[in-house]
Amino acid sequence: MRLLPILARFRRFLPALGLPALLAACSVGPDYAKPSAPVPTKFKESKDWRTARPRDGAERGAWWSVYREPELNRLLPLVEVDNQNVAAAVAAHDQAEALIREAQASLFPMVAGQYPVTRTGAGAGVLSGGGGGTTSVGTNLSHAFAQTMFYPQGSVGWTLDVWGKVRRQIESNVALAQADSALLANATLSAQAQLAIAYFSLLYEDSLKSLLLRTVKAYQETERITKNQYDSGTVSKADLITAETQVLNTQAQAIATETPRQQYEHAIAVLTGRPPAEVAVPRGALPHNPPATPPGLPSTLLERRPDIAAAERTVAGQNASIGVAVAAYYPSITLSAAGGFEGPNAFPFLAAYQIWSLGAAAADPLFDAGLRSAQVDYAKAAWRQSVASYRQTVLAAFQQVEDQLVALRVYARQLRVQEKARDEAAEAVKVYLNQYRAGTVAFTTVVVAEATLLADEEAVLATEQALFVANVTLIEALGGGYDAGSLAAEQAPPLIEAVERSSPIPPL
């Protein structure tokens, strides 16, 4: 007989034992419902917020393009390719997808084959007596024989997913893979935001150095005027020394900007996955005003924040894990079939005996000392923990947005006042310097006015830097260019399709 008729005979048992039960099986455990989240109806700090109408149509993926900085446009895409934290997140996501395939494999039967060969032999010994009272032992080899037997066999084992344990495990793994996908997006967005902040901080140091060098030139002019006054005998040497000291101190401040500037450059190199020696960012200047960023509606924040999406998908995964734990209360049902041949010919269909077996088994622990109930309680507690973490993530997200909205609003007002103070300080320096030339004010008045002007200019620059940092942080808090709809990429194949593919019986 052929192997196929044997399996065809086994197929008659499937309608009664396996396939209908599998296709119509229910999945024990709770079905997933997205937990509620504390979502406000509006942003508290958005009263004075104005969106940037000219840039509303910008591509949301490359969120950094709104800054119109060519060097930033060159650097930021490298994060997604070469940043090592992002690479680690990619590997974690790949592991999660592999776990989906691993769980899906349990829907299919396990098919095994073997081809054992055994050679056996036997011999007969003969005892005989000789003349002269002697005895001798001899062996009669005519009765010895040897035989080679072949046992090609195949077997199929199938644990039916009657209670949906495997399907719940697949559901859990899919949700966790989606969470890992969102965490990958979150790691990428975080690294990109860090790089953007480092870049604008680097430009701040460049602008600060330029400001200090311009101030050095202005102080050198004051020093020249003071020296002329000293040479003419109208001022004391103390004034000249003060002017020289003012120049030297400002030069030292300009030199000191190189340390943070190089450190920001090193940070940019590492964020792009390169050693610091391989990255050089050209000098530039901090722009005066960052672009406005539309905050969007509060409800959309849940779809635009990758960390929120990851937390919500974790809840879904933990919910499915409850079903996996509950399914352990139900017996496991296994179908098995084996068939093969036994004979002296290596080609089993030529001369061999047919052997086969069919079986079904159900197994269920009768006593487990509370093991399964503890596993269910653990799964439920893990679900409650994930719900709390999800809601806390939502609260933290709205806090971050509100923090940056108020920062941008206050910094903008602060900058307008500081710019006015700077302009008036610059006018005061001109007036006092002319009066000093005329000998109507002391040099101390000029020094104080110039120091006030430098402090005001540094304050304006620092507030502009703070505006850019808050702007980048707000974009990060709003999710950058993220869209939770991308999570649909991680999907398990439909159950019915998987079951049909897993059938071990070919059509006859």
Image (cartoon, rainbow, N blue to C red):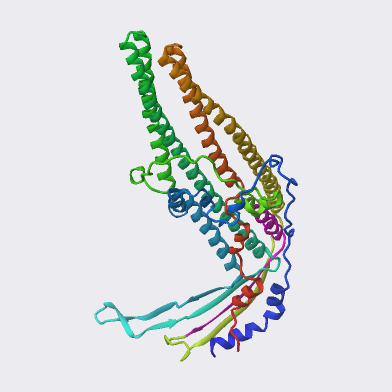
* Picture quadrant of residue 409: top right
| Residue 403 to residue 476: above or below | above
Q: How many marks?
A: 0
Asked whether the viewer can see residue 369, the reply is: no
User: Viewer-proximal residue, 434 or 12?
Assistant: 434
| Residue 95 to residue 213: above or below | below
- Residue 506 part of the magenta segment: no
The residue furthest left is 132
- Residue 418 located left or right of residue 401: left
Asked whether the viewer can see residue 496, the reply is: yes
- Residue 465 located left or right of residue 331: left
* Picture quadrant of residue 247: top left
User: Viewer-proximal residue, 477 or 506?
Assistant: 477
Q: Position of residue 9 (x, y in %)?
A: 63, 86
User: Viewer-proximal residue, 42 or 217?
Assistant: 217
Q: Position of residue 186 (x, y in %)?
A: 56, 50
Please tell me which residue is depicted at 51% across the width and 24% down the height of the picture: 425
Q: Position of residue 386 (x, y in %)?
A: 67, 48
Please tell me which residue is depicted at 59% across the width and 73% down the height of the picture: 109
User: Viewer-proximal residue, 198 or 274?
Assistant: 198
| Residue 263 to residue 353: above or below | above
The residue furthest front is 438
Please tell me which residue is depicted at 37% across the width and 44% down the height of the picture: 282
In the rendered structure, which segment of residues is drawn in magenta? 314-342
Looking at the rendered image, the quarter that the N terminus falls into is bottom right
- Residue 340 part of the magenta segment: yes
Q: Position of residue 399 (x, y in %)?
A: 66, 40
Looking at the rendered image, the quarter that the C terminus falls into is bottom right
